[in-house]
Image (cartoon, grey):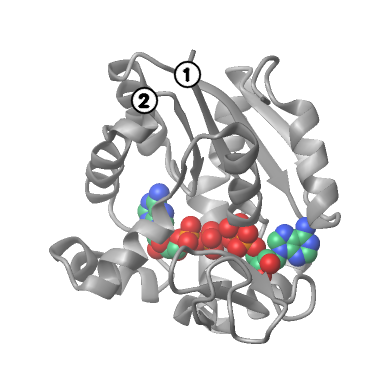
Amino acid sequence: MSIYLMLLGAPGAGKGTQAKRLMEALSVPHISSGNIFRENIKKQTELGKLAQEFISDGQLVPDDVTIAMIVTRLEQDDCADGAVLDGFPRTPTQAEALDTILADLGGKLDAVLYIKVAQETLVRRLSGRWMCRAAGHVFHDEFNPPLVPGVCDYDGSELYQRDDDRVETVAERIQVYFKQTAPLINYYRQRGLLVEVDGDQSIEAVTDALMTVLPEGTAQ
Ligand code: ADP
Ligand code: ADP
């Protein structure tokens, strides 16, 4: 049986942090659209060159490009038994595309885990965020500091602050979230797939809350 989960929440809600923890608990890959775009930008692939400007302006990458990228990723063998999706879908068009993609894989979206966080928390989280170059592990200089400043605890790679975590771009990204992505909350609630957890708690408490709301039989 496959298990496909999606994490929904504003930039800074804790999706990436929790996705890494769920991935370990459930033994399925963590698929982060943002991380895939950043890898492509680093390598300067065609996709990376196309996405770069949208990302640094705090805008969404167009749906057709994003959907094609996710199809390619989800078709890889390691996703056959499931995945934790982080940052995709972000628009109603992407949400519809996801249903088709998962049906083609013989699966379905099992639950949407909505991490709800007060708006004032988001800016504090994003302005202190540090990300690892190798695998997108996330830290925070105040709330989740690495053991050695500037070095990833998990793989020893360098930590950096994302260009789009600058204050001006963060404000734009939060607006984009409320306009283009937040409508998915009701969309999935109406379909009975949405489960909500309070993201304004410690990282461990949010993970515990997520583990208790996962569909039955999911956690190993
Ligand atoms: P998202 O993927 O939703 O943008 P991240 O997982 O990257 O969010 O988290 C944003 C920042 O907030 C990171 O620096 C992370 O270490 C920190 N963070 C995540 N969850 C919490 C939490 N529950 N409490 C405090 N800080 C958190
Ligand atoms: P965050 O963790 O702060 O929510 P992400 O790393 O998920 O941010 O995404 C970074 C940027 O990559 C977004 O601001 C957007 O420009 C682009 N992006 C990521 N996922 C998508 C998507 N599903 N659709 C369109 N653009 C996306």
Vertical order, 201 against 52 (above or below): above
Q: Amino acid at mark 1?
A: Ser
Residue 166, percent across and down?
Answer: 54, 83
Indicate the quadrant of ligand 2 in the picture: bottom left
Look at mark 2 in the image and give the residue it sits on: 80
Query: Could one spot residue 119 in this view of the protein?
Result: no
Q: What's the amino acid at mark 2? A: Ala
Residue at 30 percent across and 31 percent down: it is: 77
Of callouts 1 and 2, the N-terminal one: 1
Look at 65% across and 47% down and name the residue there: 21
- Label pair 1/2, CB-CB below 8 angstroms: yes
Residue 173, position as x, y percentages in the image: 52, 66
Expressed as whole percent of the image width and height from the top left, the position of residue 147 reads 72, 78
Q: Quadrant of residue 104?
A: top left
The circle drawn on residue 43 is: none
Q: Is residue 1 above or below residue 17?
A: above
Q: Dot 1: what SS?
A: loop
Crowd band around label 2 with a 10 angstrom C-alpha radius: few (<14), some (14–19), many (20+): some
The quadrant the C terminus occupies is top right
Q: Is residue 93 above or below residue 149?
A: above
Q: Residues within 10 Å of mark 1 (few under 14, many from 20)?
A: some
Q: Which residue is mark 1?
A: 2
Location of residue 105 with respect to 48 vertically, above or below: above
| Residue 147 visible in the snapshot | yes
* Residue at the (65%, 80%) spot, across then down: 127
